[in-house]
Amino acid sequence: MKFIQYIGGIFTALRSLAGGMIVTWKELLTPKVTMEYPENRKTLVISDRWRSELIMPHDENNEHACTACGICMINCPNGTIQVTSSSIDTEDGKKKKILDKHLWDYGSCTFCNLCVITCPSDAIIFNNDFEGAVFDKSKLLHRLNHEGSKLRDRKKEASTLDTSAKKENKEA
Amino acid sequence: MLIYSQPLELTKLLAAIDNFLQGNLTPGWTVLVKGILVGILILAAYTLIALSLIYIERKVAAFFQARLGPNRLGKYGVIQSLADMIKILIKEVIQINKADKLLFYAAPFFVIVASVLAFGALPFGMNLHALDFNIGVFYLLAVSSLGIIGILLAGWSSNNKYSMIGAMRSGAQFISYELSAGFSLMTIVVLSGSMQFSEIIEGQRYCWNLFNGHLPAMIAFLIYLISGHAETNRGPFDLPEAESELTAGYHTEYSGLQFGFFYLSEYLNMFIVAAVAATVFLGGWMPVQIKGWEAFNQVMWYIPSWAWFFGKAGLLMFFSLWVRWSFPRLRIDLLLNLEWKYLLPINLANLLVMVVIVLSGFTLTDLFPALFGK
Ligand code: SF4
Ligand code: SF4
């Protein structure tokens, strides 16, 4: 009886070992999903929800939607955003704030998205451009508004592409 | 027997070198120069094979684990292990304060010398055989067992409990499985009636020993592969180096080139086991031939003998990698259980069966001399 068990045990073991080897053999032949990054730049797909770099979309007239209200700066938990503004007089005699510099520090941002959510004018969004590594720390400080840009006229705003893209982004 | 044309064989080249040396030097110098040449060749082949094995192992392991493995250095990462070698060569050999200095430094040499000695006695191809002892199998078993002395010394002299436990485990494992490996090779020695590698290979011209001895030969083959794995400390029998328990086992304290020696010899031992199995069971460098099919045989001979040898050994090595990445590591008691309660008794019975089969003429060559006979 013992002897039969002994022999039976050997065959059970061999069978289960062979079963394991079949499993690993299948694994050997399955196509690998590893992405080889710098080579696959062209085909690389980054999720739309990925937050890489804060940008302020400008339209073809070099106009943005930032009213320099400073809400993003107040809401940022890390003090990453610095909004500086100056006030000018408009033609009809009113005082108006305009944006001087919208500074965002890539190095201290936690990509929490609070600034984007709270901006009343939907002036800033996160893009997908994740290759943000630089050799110098000072290069991490981005100025978001372009040189010579100005505030977009409210009436035209609804038709611009940038904000509609922004809305989609928020809904997602 | 027909003489086949063998265009890619190295025999002519070797003969030319031999003639050249004998024509220009006195006999004593000829032997000396030849010895040095062979030594250099063997060492070069040793390093090359070990490096390519390390690369292949990493690649195959990666594919078994659904990864790509090294893929940055050169096309598909082929020169990765070369870079690793350079890195290891320029690393500092760290002095261990309370180690037994002499033994500590001697240990890696024992390991590497044992595997070079065994490597040198392998028949790589037709006439590519440094020394054809008439006790080749015995010699190989003897020198490959020397390595364990190095491992025990390494563990002892490191003055480190992990190294010591690793070395003791390795010793227990090696000595146990050496028995099985020896007996399974003896089974084939009984079958082929010789311990000389060249004769064993010649005997497998039309029928590999694996088939010639049918059932007992196949059992011996399996047992040899299992114990070969265990002797080379490779998974699933890699408890001497179980990193989760022993950091790195017996070579924990070694660094730089000394570690490199252990590393190289581990891979080379794997090759040696595969090569011996291929030579003894699968016909070694002898091309596949079928009696009477002259055209077919000629085609087979166009493939040079060393390609056959490396092909067969390569298959077995792939098998070994496959096993390594399939099974979980054994516990030490189960490991010794497997050897002493299963492999050894089966092996002894198997040897007896083989003797009976050979004596009563039940081998394939005896049963069908027209098909397989010499
Ligand atoms: S994402 Fe968060 S941390 Fe980054 S700038 Fe916006 S509010 Fe600040
Ligand atoms: S980005 Fe938005 S929240 Fe920030 S200052 Fe401009 S308008 Fe205000």
Image: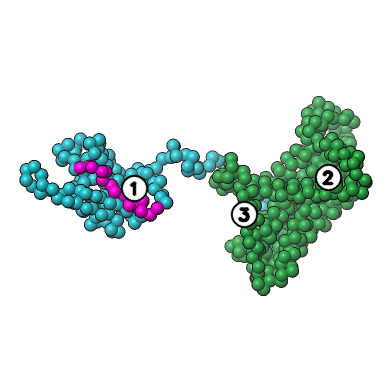
Q: Quick check: marks 3 and 2 in contact, CB under 8 Å?
A: no
Q: Which residue type carries mark 3?
A: Lys
Q: Is mark 1 within 8 Å of ligand 1?
A: no
Residue at the outermost left position: A93
**Residue B227 in magenta?**
no
Q: Which residue type carries mark 2?
A: His
**Mark pair 3, 2: CA separation:** 33 Å
Identify the residue at horizontal 85%, vertical 46% (top origin). Answer: B34
Instruction: Determine which residue is flagged by label 3.
Output: B87
Identify the residue at horizontal 20%, vertical 35% (top origin). Answer: A159
Expressed as whole percent of the image width and height from the top left, the position of residue B189 reads 86, 49
**Mark pair 1, 3: CA separation:** 38 Å
Instruction: Determine which residue is flagged by label 1.
Output: A53
Chain B palette colour: green
Q: Which mark is residue B3?
A: none
Element under label 1?
strand
Element under label 2?
loop
Expressed as whole percent of the image width and height from the top left, the position of residue A7 reads 73, 53
Instruction: Determine which residue is flagged by label 2.
Output: B129
> Relative to the observer, which residue lies in front, A131 or B202?
A131
Rate crowding at label 2 as few (under 14), some (14 to 19) or many (20 or more) other CA atoms within 10 Å: some
Range drawn in magenta:
A136-150
Expressed as whole percent of the image width and height from the top left, the position of residue B308 reads 76, 38
